[in-house]
Image (tube, helix red, strand yellow):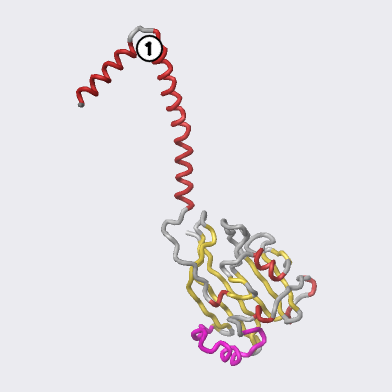
Amino acid sequence: MAARRGSVYLNMNLLLHLNFPPLQEARAIFLKFLDRINGINRMMKPWVLGVSSFVLLAAPAQADPATSIPAIARLCGIRVGWDTMTALETRLGPGLAYTGGHPLGARGWRCPALGLLINADGFYYRDRGRDQDRVVDDLSICRLAGYREDLKFPLAHLLPSQALFMGVVSPGMTRAEVRAALGSSLPAPQVEGDQWIWNAPGFTRINVLNHVVVRSWQARLTFQHGKLDDIDLRADADEP
């Protein structure tokens, strides 16, 4: 069988080189066709390589763990390290823009009805889904006592239940009240001076292209004059 294939190839090669006009014309058309195919291959190769490189760079090195957001990440109706500034402003109303991680990237509100100030910031942008705004990685509420009227923070539409840490703790409580309200829902905090600190693991992917993920969260409660003054929640967003 191999000999027959070789004979056919030799015979076709001989015919293509014979000085016979119809065969010469067919040979020319065939060679032009091969040149065109080779040209397309040369044009496509860099594009295919570029797309392949982009996909390899954009895709995570391995499958992500399941999204897991700890209970300490919830405040003001959102989840720090997952929801965006757009989602927060949808709940509270437009905030006053000021410089945080980005120029005019942070937001501030006041809520006189609850006696609170609210501040939020975010650095990394989500790159999938409809809402591709900055993901909130720092959210705090504190007592309104130190508010400067010249800041002109807009009013926040905040329900009392949304201003509670772990659903039970609000600014103005004493240490004993905070401890009793939390009960066994959280382990004992790490105490640093007037601050109580909790750290919790989890996982969210903020940005696929830049490999930005959150693997740890922190809740920091600050007491002043024996009462809870500030609740600050942070997501430790990072990229390799």
Q: What's drawn in magenta, residue-wise?
A: 169-191
Residue 133 to residue 155: above or below: above
Horizontal side of 238 relative to 14 (left or right) equals: right
Answer with the quarter of the image where residue 131 lies: bottom right
Question: Neighbour class for label 1 at 10 Å: few (<14), some, many (≥20)?
Answer: some
Quarter the N terminus occupies: top left
Disc 1, SS: helix
Amino acid type of the residue tagged 1 in the rendering = Leu
| Image x and y of residue 25, in percent | 42, 12
Horizontal side of 170 relative to 219 (left or right) equals: right
| Image x and y of residue 24, in percent | 39, 11
Horizontal side of 4 relative to 126 (left or right) equals: left
Residue at figure coordinates x 30%, y 16% from the top left? 13
Residue at figure coordinates x 72%, y 82% from the top left? 114
Residue 89 to residue 51: above or below: below
Residue on which disc 1 sits:
23
Horizontal side of 102 relative to 56 (left or right) equals: right
Q: Nearer the viewer, residue 112 or 132?
A: 132
Q: Nearer the viewer, residue 104 or 224?
A: 104
